[in-house]
Image: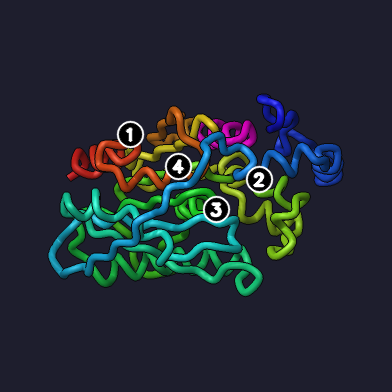
């Protein structure tokens, strides 16, 4: 396991793209690869098998929990992610698992567009919903965070977004360019910047459409220091831009357990999600 300190430096404090590239190249090392390999930070002995449970959504007015799966934009699927639905559906929450074209078939730009359209579809298909709550894990948290910046006007509808749950995500994609995770993605630095919520929040600024909409940024205790850094910096940027953001470091969980434990109704994150949904109703 690597050191317990995050990588130093900050891309958006540099004065030119050339300086940013030099900073990233300086970080190009086994440690950078290590920081962005979540499986290397797992401290448990074995993985628990996840349940795969499905429930058909009816037409009644319900709160909708829309989930974007992780897998570094190159693995995973909506079907593999349906394990956590029981504690939510048992409380009357409709759960939607979103599929998107992972790499190498899909590019980051296409993935962001697809998940945007999925949120639009839910709103148009269920216009009387009692709120849409977006949740993503790892790469899915990045996609969910990009929804904070979406231009809904061009889609002809403003979704009834009532909450965001961003779990162990990557929000500054530029370091990923210099890791093996980029092999199927083929991201350039320009692609990474364009699809980095952190960049948009810090450089371009992004004011909330609804300042009362809560945004939870969560990370596992045993996530790598880089995942901790990225989560804390996103939370700080959201607060500066006027979002109702909160930060949680969930104890005794790694990058995978933090989302797998949603199968448990008494799990800390499960309880946060349910309390947020039903306090908003």
Mark 4 or 1: in front is 4
Residue segment shown in magenta: 223-236
Location of mark 1 (residue)? 268
Mark 3 or 1: in front is 1
Disc 3 from disc 2: Cα separation:
12 Å
Residue 99 appears left or right of 30: left
The residue positioned 34% from the left and 61% from the top of the image is 52
Disc 4 from disc 2: Cα separation:
15 Å
First in sequence, mark 3 or 2: give its number.
2
Where is residue 246, by image quadrant?
top left
Most distant residue in the left direction? 60
Where is residue 195, by image quadrant?
bottom right
Residue 193 appears left or right of 19: left
First in sequence, mark 3 or 1: give its number.
3
The residue positioned 66% from the left and 25% from the top of the image is 4
Q: Are marks 3 and 2 in contact (CB under 8 Å)?
A: no
| 169 vs 4, nearest the viewer | 4
Q: Is residue 34 magenta?
A: no
Residue 158 is at least partly visible in this image: no
Location of mark 3 (residue)? 139
Q: Quadrant of the C terminus?
A: top left
Q: Residues within 10 Å of mark 2 (few under 14, many from 20)?
A: some
- Where disc 1 sits, the SS reads helix
- Where disc 3 sits, the SS reads helix
Q: How far across and down, in percent of the image, does residue 213 sit? A: 33, 42
Location of mark 4 (residue)? 257
Location of mark 2 (residue)? 37
Disc 3 from disc 4: Cα separation:
15 Å
């Amino acid at each position: 396991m690597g050191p317990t300190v995050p990588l130093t430096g900050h891309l958006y404090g540099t004065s030119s793209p050339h300086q940013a590239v030099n900073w990233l190249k300086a970080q190009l090392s086994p440690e950078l690869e290590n920081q962005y390999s979540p499986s290397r930070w797992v401290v448990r002995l074995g993985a628990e098998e996840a349940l795969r449970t499905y429930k058909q959504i009816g037409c009644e007015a319900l709160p909708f929990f829309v989930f974007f799966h992780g897998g570094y934009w190159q693995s995973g699927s909506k079907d593999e992610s349906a394990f956590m639905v029981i504690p939510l559906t048992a409380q009357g929450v409709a759960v939607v698992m979103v599929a998107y074209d992972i790499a190498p078939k899909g590019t980051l730009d296409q993935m962001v567009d697809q998940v945007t359209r999925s949120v639009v579809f839910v709103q148009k298909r269920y216009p009387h919903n009692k709120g849409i709550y977006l949740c993503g894990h790892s790469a899915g948290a990045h996609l969910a965070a990009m929804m904070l910046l979406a231009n809904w006007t061009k889609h002809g509808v403003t979704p009834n977004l009532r909450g965001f749950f961003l779990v162990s995500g990557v929000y500054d994609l530029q370091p990923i360019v210099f890791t093996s995770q980029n092999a199927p993605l083929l991201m350039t630095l320009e692609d990474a910047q364009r699809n980095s919520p952190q960049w948009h929040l810090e450089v371009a600024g992004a004011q909330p459409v609804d300042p009362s909409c809560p945004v939870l940024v969560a990370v596992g205790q045993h996530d790598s220091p880089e995942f901790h850094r990225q989560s804390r910096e996103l939370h700080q940027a959201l607060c500066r831009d006027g979002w109702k953001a909160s930060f949680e470091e969930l104890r005794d969980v790694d990058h995978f357990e933090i989302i797998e434990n949603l199968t448990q109704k008494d799990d800390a994150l499960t309880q946060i999600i349910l309390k947020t949904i039903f306090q908003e109703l």
